[in-house]
């Protein structure tokens, strides 16, 4: 089968920026649903179920074989469980703290991926990578307003520590998922791998809901706005996730992937416009430092 040529650079960058905004909108819609009593597991069920159906249609339309390569079954299962945990932790964080802060913390996964790769026998981080990691962590201190919280001047925010911890766990789970994808499942077709991952995420959320592991996890929205948020997050995530994997072979991700890091910036703007969530000038400065550090960390020079 002939390989389609990459998109022109401007088109690829514009498409990735659009996808980043779609993912940002997904989290804003999720917070809207959660603010109107929607359960976290319900949101995951809607999101993963619809995305699975769309990807299943693509897999069968492309007539892809469903047999997994030998020895990959357990890794595919692990990948699905990791993404399920990441989804649960990130949505739980979004429900508790400003959406932009949750995304900033969760988007530190490149640091964790680099350290995990090193710990499991990969190359050690370069001096440039180490400096950028330090820069990102300093930026996070300001973005999360840690000095004010430690001094007690930020006021009582009981959900702050739990929200940050959940977002950090989401970053860890996603870094592990990326390592598994890159080192154990790289030979699988992306669409099939994603379809199976969404199927496992849906199954995990359904089992957790049936066992009542998350109190209120399957609560229905108590207002029409909550249903709109639930529908919007499903549409935005399903559309963005599917479009990303369909177009990925033509997006030159090795070169253009840093564009996706505009997601926290888009989240900050949408959170202000739609939810009325604002950050202090110091927090915004810290967020700029974090995003800039992540972009530089993931940037690769190309001739």
Image (spheres, rainbow, N blue to C red):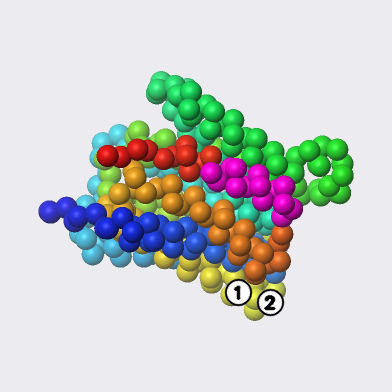
Where disc 2 sits, the SS reads loop
- On the image, the x and y values in percent for residue 166 come to 65, 44
Q: Say whether marks 1 and 2 touch (CB < 8 Å).
A: yes
Residue extending farthest to the left is: 1
The quadrant holding residue 62 is: bottom left
Is residue 44 highlighted in magenta? no
Q: Residue at x 53, y 70 (%)?
A: 232
Residue 268, relative to residue 294: is it above or below?
A: below
Q: Which residue is mark 2?
A: 223
Residue 5 placement, left or right of 150: left
Where disc 1 sits, the SS reads helix
Nearer the observer, 163 or 68: 163
Q: Which residues are magenta?
A: 279-292
Nearer the observer, 189 or 274: 274
Density class for disc 1 (Cα within 10 Å; few <14, some 14-19, many ≥20) is many
Q: Which residue is mark 1?
A: 227
């Amino acid at each position: 089968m002939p390989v389609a040529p990459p998109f022109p650079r401007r088109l690829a960058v514009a498409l990735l920026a659009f996808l980043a905004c779609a993912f940002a909108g997904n989290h804003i819609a999720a917070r809207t649903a959660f603010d109107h009593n929607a359960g976290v597991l319900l949101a995951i069920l809607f999101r993963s179920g619809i995305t699975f159906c769309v990807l299943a249609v693509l897999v069968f339309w492309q007539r892809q074989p469903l047999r997994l390569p030998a020895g990959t079954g357990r890794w595919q299962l692990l990948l699905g469980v990791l993404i399920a945990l990441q989804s649960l932790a990130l949505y739980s964080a979004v429900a508790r703290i400003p959406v932009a802060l949750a995304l900033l913390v969760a988007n530190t996964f490149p640091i964790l991926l680099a350290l995990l790769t090193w710990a499991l026998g990969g190359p050690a981080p370069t001096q440039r990578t180490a400096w950028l990691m330090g820069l990102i962590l300093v930026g996070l201190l300001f973005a999360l307003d840690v000095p004010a919280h430690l001094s007690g001047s930020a006021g009582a925010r009981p959900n702050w520590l739990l929200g940050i911890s959940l977002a950090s766990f989401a970053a860890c789970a996603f870094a592990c998922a990326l390592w598994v994808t890159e080192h154990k499942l790289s030979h699988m077709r992306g669409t099939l791998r994603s379809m199976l991952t969404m199927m496992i995420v849906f199954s995990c959320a359904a089992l957790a809901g049936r066992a009542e592991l998350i109190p209120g996890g399957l609560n229905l929205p108590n207002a029409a706005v909550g249903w709109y948020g639930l529908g919007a997050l499903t549409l935005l995530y399903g559309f963005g996730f599917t479009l990303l994997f369909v177009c990925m072979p033509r997006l030159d991700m090795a070169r253009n992937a840093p564009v996706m890091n505009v997601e926290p910036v888009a989240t900050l703007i949408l959170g202000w416009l739609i939810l009325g969530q604002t950050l202090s000038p110091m927090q915004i400065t810290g967020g700029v430092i974090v995003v800039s550090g992540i972009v530089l960390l993931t940037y690769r020079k190309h001739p």
